[in-house]
Amino acid sequence: MDSMTERDLYHRPTTLADALAVLSETPLRVAAGCTDLFPATERKVLPGPILDITAIEELRGIETGPDGYAIGATTTWSDIVDADLPPAFDGLKLAAREVGARQIQARGTLAGNLCNASPAADGVPPLLTLDAAVELQSAQGMRRVPLSDFIKGPRKTDLRSDELVTHTHIPSHTIDGDGFFLKLGARKYLVISIAMTAARIVVEDGIVKDAALAIGACSPVATRLPEAEAALVGAPVDPMRITREMIVHHLSPIDDMRADAGYRHKTALELLRRTLSPLAQGRAA
Amino acid sequence: MTRLIVGETCHEIASPPGKRLSEVLRDELNLKSVKVGCDAGDCGACTVLVDGAQVCACLTPVAQVDGRTIETVETAEPDLAAKLQAAFLDHGAAQCGICTPGMMMAALELLRSNPEPSRQEVEVALGGVLCRCTGYAKIVDAVAGLAPRAARANGHAVGMPIRRLDGQPKVDGSEQFGADVGPADALLVRAIRSPHFHAVFEFGDLEAWTSTAQVTVLTANDIPGVNRFGVIPPLADQPALAERTARYLGEAVALVVGPAETVEPLDLATFPITWEPCEHAVTEAEGPIAPLLHNSRPGNVLIKGRVATGDPDAALGEAAHVAEASFQTSYVEHAYIEPEAGVAWMEGDTLVIHACTQAPIMDRDDTATILGLPPEKVRIVPTAAGGGFGAKLDLSVQPLVGLATMVTGKPCRMVYTRNESMRASTKRHPGTMHAKIGADAQGRVTGMVFDGDFNTGAYASWGPTVATRVPVHASGPYRTPNYRAEARAIHTHGPVAGAFRGFGVPQAAIMQELLYDDLAQKSGLDRLAFRRLNAFQDGDKTPSGQTLASVGMLECLDALKPYWERALDDAARHPDGPTRRGVGIASCWYGCGNTALPNPSTIRLGITPDGRLRLHQGATDIGQGSNTVIAQIAADALGVPVDIFELIGPDTGITPDCGKTSASRQTYITGRAAEAAGKALRAEILRHTNFSDEAQLSFDAGTLTARENGKTQTIDLGALNAHGYALMAEETYDPPTTELDADGQGTPYALYGFGAQIAEVEVDMALGTTRVLKMTAAHDVGRAINPLLAEGQIEGGIAQGLGLALMEEFLPGRTENLHDYLIPTVGDMPEITSILIEKPDPEGPMGAKGLGEHVLIPTAPSILNAIRHATGARLTKAPALPHRVLAAIEEAALEEKPTTYSDAHLTSDAGGVDGP
């Protein structure tokens, strides 16, 4: 295959409009950090056709507006770590520091993490606690889908072939409170999670006013835990208010090479409670 | 066009925009310091800086760095890079060198913004680069700017922590590994491999496919010689390309050869072959009842090994205390960061093969047999090996690139992908072991029986070595007067299990050391004291009936005692909470060299007519340091400074055989040959003078001069001797061993090394996760030829032992990459204290003993014993993944009699009998 053909198969537009125009004509594989695309091939050249969105200036970075935060699709984990964000985003920042290692964080993008739809995607639980929505654009227009609806299952999303994820949107009503995140893995760096948990707690006068909890890698799609959240509200932060019964029916873990299902069932509660401990110990006071 | 700014230059690149930056830098800009270890962002070997930020070049499409500044080791700012290079050399931070460029780039990013980083900051910066050799400690020291460790040789070289003599290319990126050599237009070889554990296959219309794809296809039918190889010639059973039946997942059945631009993008799924999957077995339990893999081996038993002495059944019957258990270990992958690679071409009628290897002469002989050539028509030139650890003892690319070159007449190259490397290379044998050990009322071990089945996979490889080494060593370095140990190597359709640092002894040590903790408890003895009571001493007999001399076990255990007491004290003081702390101890012994078989090394030293001193150093240095250590020994034997040698590597065309780099044999056996050659050359030189052996030799400006008592004599180098040298010496050493009889009695090794390690761990009681906080290792090395390199071996061995204990489990077909198969990262390593004990062995060169494998053996058992000490959890399978530890903790909680220890604590309030 000569390089001219390869070049034709690789689009790198500089504007969103151009990207959407190309996408409306033909289905393309959307590439940003390529931290999932390249590992999926042994080839020296990314198999196309490719739509590389990293030259589109308007997709990079985090913007705030009256209705919340918009995290551009090519915003990397490193960008998130370095960004000046309210404490509600601390869970997301902690997750960003735990993705791979620095080389991966410098390339991998938040939107790519969502589109890859791995059950062990580190970005999903903290974003769920922020009530994140995914902004999808096509030449036809824009729609905003709650993250919890966007990821349909392992490697399955609601993304249409003519659509692009342009932003991850965090509504202004969730930027209150403090976030935290814990990842459980069999080694320190470069590790895929056995399980991970995220929490965001709003405390007023020592009493939990609002709580958002999520768990990942324990079900086909990371999930919020509404009963456990409800149990926390109206009392001082107390991890022990969460019981196994409140979370167990949300979990359907599998056996894999990292851990067995029984282990994930057993540790989910512990991990969740520990995610709350730093918030209970005054950070949220 | 893509524009890349490298150094001061802007390069215009015509590559496809989606090409990996790593490939562009290597192929088009010849920046070969950028290493490809996985092509998946899992290893970090290709780490470069893009506008100052570290990224994996393998994950970066070149289009995305248009107009940006790229830095590699070759092109990064010279001052900082030189400082870092010096630090790496001064700390011994580069062993094989394959991860070094990536490590250095990751470090540069950090040091620019933070010139005096903490260890924690260094860890975060280097977290994405894997190293399989060093255990990371010396890399962190180098980056954190600790005071240099290396010293210059001063008079004597032996005993000095000198820099590696071959270190500079490793730190400046110019080292050539298997994928870095050969002409750029070499044809590319790719293999068609079995997608099934066991299958019969038939080729379709090869001719049609070949003509469409414009390539050459080679199968077993094209092999001109005998399509069988194996490291143990009488048991050779492995085809270079399978014939009709594939016996393991990933076995090569055909080769596709052609220009790289044609072969690289080919979709090999279109290759015309039909597979008929057959019944298969992948565990040592299933092996004996599975279809026979080799008709001459009933029950799929490759071989049995046995050592027996005294009456163990009676001894166990009469023992005051008996401990008994079973233990299972997993397939472990070597996971060197350099996948197998090499290139071949013809020079006249000689086939020349440059490839990474640990065993050049064995490669030459087996490749010659397969290709129907006389051995002298095959020349193996080892490239730098980016790690080996045993798996590069077996053939990989050598016969395949050789065949392709013979058929096409053109240079041919092959570079395994990470997946291919993990499928096709050998593994550590999984073992299912059972043992019973008895002790008398005073805690003296009286008898032991051991039984182990080891999964040797589809072909023999080093299975026989494992089956013979394990029974010899399964007692541990402890007096065991009544003993019976049997080990079987069982064929399965799993990956071929071969040599991996320790040949089965690390697995057996887990079994034995676990039972020693039981017996210490039953005897009411401190666990270190129990081991000391039973440890081998000079004059003791091994279970093989060999009388030992120069045993440093007591010295090692005594050196550890203060650390042990302090560690127990620390663990006892740790408050009860979500985590608990524990301490474990284990020992090792290991015979250096082949088991009861000849394995000579020959060293040649020569002085050229123009006064240059050459050392033909045939011990392949895969990172462990023989290029340096052998030179140090030769230098002192000859009486010259170590830095005047010109090193000639293990090229089979010009360097005598120093055997394979395995069995911890090079320092000892090649070292002895080097010592003898050095002395012989010295005698030869002095024969030309009237001086005594006290004379001083010096090489200056092409002149060799001897001095004694103020008199000077210049030696005439005009007359040529053998091999183009004016003066030359060549000496061979082969360890004095004897064959073993049916009960394993004899002298299997001429020399042993000894050691012991303490592990301190913290276990999370609710999550089952284990953090190793500290390892303290005491090893009797006889004589530390180079203490810096010896420490590097200890730290690297501990890293691999920690992986074996806690995270490494190769599941064929499931973990064939470096994100599902986990090896320790910089963040997983504990602080390591190394204590070098020197109890010289008269058989070793200047007293030295082997070390390379010893260091891994005590690590896993000491960690597993520490987990048990912390939690009561008695693991029955390694690795101790969190779910296994948690299950064992829960099981321990149900026990009626909790484990009690009688360890001696430093402080009285923590002393006595107390559980963790």
Image (cartoon, coloured by chain):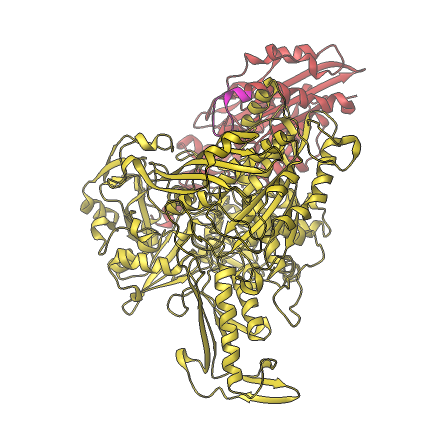
Indicate the position of residue B425 as horizontal and vertical percent values: 39, 45
Residue drawn at 28 percent across, 48 percent down: B239
Q: Which residues are magenta?
A: A253-264
Chain letter for red, please: A
Q: Is residue B49 above or below residue A170?
A: below
Indicate the position of residue B816 as horizontal and vertical percent values: 43, 38
In this view, the residue in front, B306 or A271, is B306
Indicate the position of residue A49 as horizontal and vertical percent values: 40, 38
Q: Main secondary structure of the magenta part?
A: loop
In this view, the residue in front, B472 or B825, is B472
Q: Image quadrant for the C terminus of chain B? A: top right
Indicate the position of residue B253 as horizontal and vertical percent values: 27, 44
Residue B134 can be seen, yes or no: no
Instruction: Determine the image quadrant of residue B584.
Output: top right
Residue B35 horizontal side relative to residue B791, left or right: left
In this view, the residue in front, B695 or A105, is B695
Residue A177 horizontal side relative to residue B318, left or right: right
Q: Is residue B285 magenta?
A: no
- For chain B, the rendered hue is yellow
